[in-house]
Image (cartoon, grey):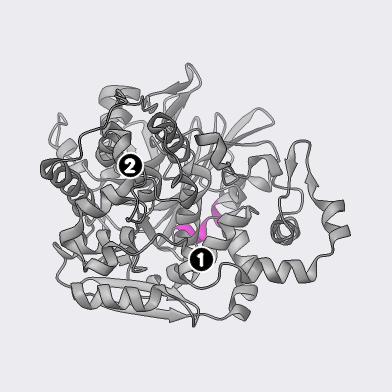
Amino acid sequence: MCGIVGTYPEEDASSIRRGLKKLKHRGPDEQALAQTPSGTLGHSRLAIIDVADGQQPMAYGDTWIVFNGEIYNYRELQDTLGEPTETDSDTEVILKLYAEYGPDAVGMLDGMFALAIIREDSLFLARDPLGIKPLYYATHEGQLYFASEIKGLAWLTQEINEFPPGCWWDPESGFHKYNHTEKPCPPIVMERWPRPTRSDLDGIQQTLREAVHKRLVADDVVNVGVALSGGLDSSIVAALARERRANLDSFVVGMPNSEDIPASQQVAEFLGTRHHVYVYTFEEMIQALPEVIYYLESFDAPLIRSSIPNYFLARLASQHVKVILTGEGADELFAGYEYLRPVSNPGKLHRELWRITSGLHNTNLQRADRMSMAFGLEARVPFLDDQVVDLAFNLPPQWKLHEPGWPEKELLRRATAGLLPANIVKRPKQKFSDGAGSINLLAEYANLTISDRAFAQERQIGDSSTLRTKEELMYFRIFKEIFGQDIPAEIVGRTRSVTRDELN
């Protein structure tokens, strides 16, 4: 896990050094820069795979790469190369695959990534299918610049764009969608649909197991832990990770009234993890807000609300591990959100789940990436494994409709019931900020400190963006105080807002 920054087609070492300084938090272990005849590449490294020899930028002949992410099948790909590798780094595997297969190499990668390759007089950029790893680009005075975070470019220009997930780009071909991620709805039969069999449920559990186990890869000197809120999703990940890790660290945060803390302690005791707890106060939340917004690069209210406990969790975890597994993505794949409970049309449910899954790259995945990387911590998301996503969207959508008497995500609960205590399996879904005990406090604070008149005067931002609440205005004021006019409001991802009537 790292931060990358670069430019093409001319060298610009001074700008890349300046951008690299803005990304130091993403890779505190070392920073390096390479100048090529066709551009400059910068890399800020968090060393996890091949700690001794995996430095970047990395060269192979006249080809250079900078890469942010993890490739979980890199050892299998290593065996397909026509020559041995000099390192045990996934970076070298990508570099040699590209040298052999060109752009087709990205379709072979199983993992999360944003990467840049300069070869001769051309640049190649690519991003993973769901946008787990971030990438932005901008043009300035005839040069193309790119970076892992907006702040790596914002000092240079306001004309910043998000690089689309599941795409690659080069100057000859432009953007090319290598991952055709649209998930067509399986055939829908309107009569009563057969319930999932034990084999179906076991298949879901085994696919999740493989996704979790592959994400435990790291050098022996690198510790891997799990976020454990005591909710269903994180508890499943912890249970499956514990199968392979005898000494597993788990982490939870919350306010003194948090429901997550006792639930997580129960799961930790059940699984036998080394559990770490941090209790934060409202005053700490207010103090942390500017730093949360600085790293998150957003003013979206629901995203910031959930980022605050993520921030404290990442800070706690970074004191013990370099890698943490999270339950991100389960609600999108298995219909975990409260607004989806009344949906009775399976086709509409399927389309809505795909809409929110494909939109994760600049909302929840941005939160997971930015809050972890703020502390030089790598977050891995097994629920968003390619195989898990494909399986989830090929299941009959009828299986994901809400059943009376069960909490949401009944299908996932039944598939993993044997892994966890019964009360955890049936624990209702709570938003992270809700379970942590902080969901309404910031909204109440904003309502007390911002007048109706001020809200009416300031809520319109840009030509097409509107702030939805006083809470969001409070965040936007901090956002503009930090970034000034450097970051256009239009590039900020917004949490989807939809009414129940739209889905029935």
**Disc 2 secondary structure class:** helix
Q: Residue at x 20, y 50 (%)?
A: 415
Q: Residues within 10 Å of mark 2 (few under 14, many from 20)?
A: many
Q: Position of residue 494 (x, y in %)?
A: 60, 45
- Most foreground residue, 267 or 29: 267
* Residue numbers of the magenta segment: 20-26
Mark found first going from the N terminus, 2 or 1: 2
Pointers 2 and 1 in contact (C-beta within 8 Å): no
Query: In the rendered structure, does residue 460 fall within the stretch colored magenta?
Result: no
468 lies left or right of 48: right
Is 79 located above or below residue 272 in the figure?
above
Instruction: Give the labeled residue for mark 1.
Output: 433
Q: Residues within 10 Å of mark 1 (few under 14, many from 20)?
A: many
Considering the whole magenta stretch, tell me its main secondary structure: helix
113 lies left or right of 38: left
- Most foreground residue, 210 or 400: 400
Query: In the rendered structure, does residue 23 fall within the stretch colored magenta?
Result: yes
Q: Nearer the viewer, mark 2 or mark 1?
A: 2
Instruction: Give the labeled residue for mark 2.
Output: 400
251 lies left or right of 313: left
Residue 241 visible in the snapshot: yes
Q: Residue at x 14, y 70 (%)?
A: 246
- Most foreground residue, 206 or 71: 206
Is 474 located above or below residue 496 in the figure?
below
**Disc 1 secondary structure class:** helix
| CA gap, disc 2 and disc 1 | 25 Å
Q: Position of residue 251 (x, y in %)?
A: 35, 72
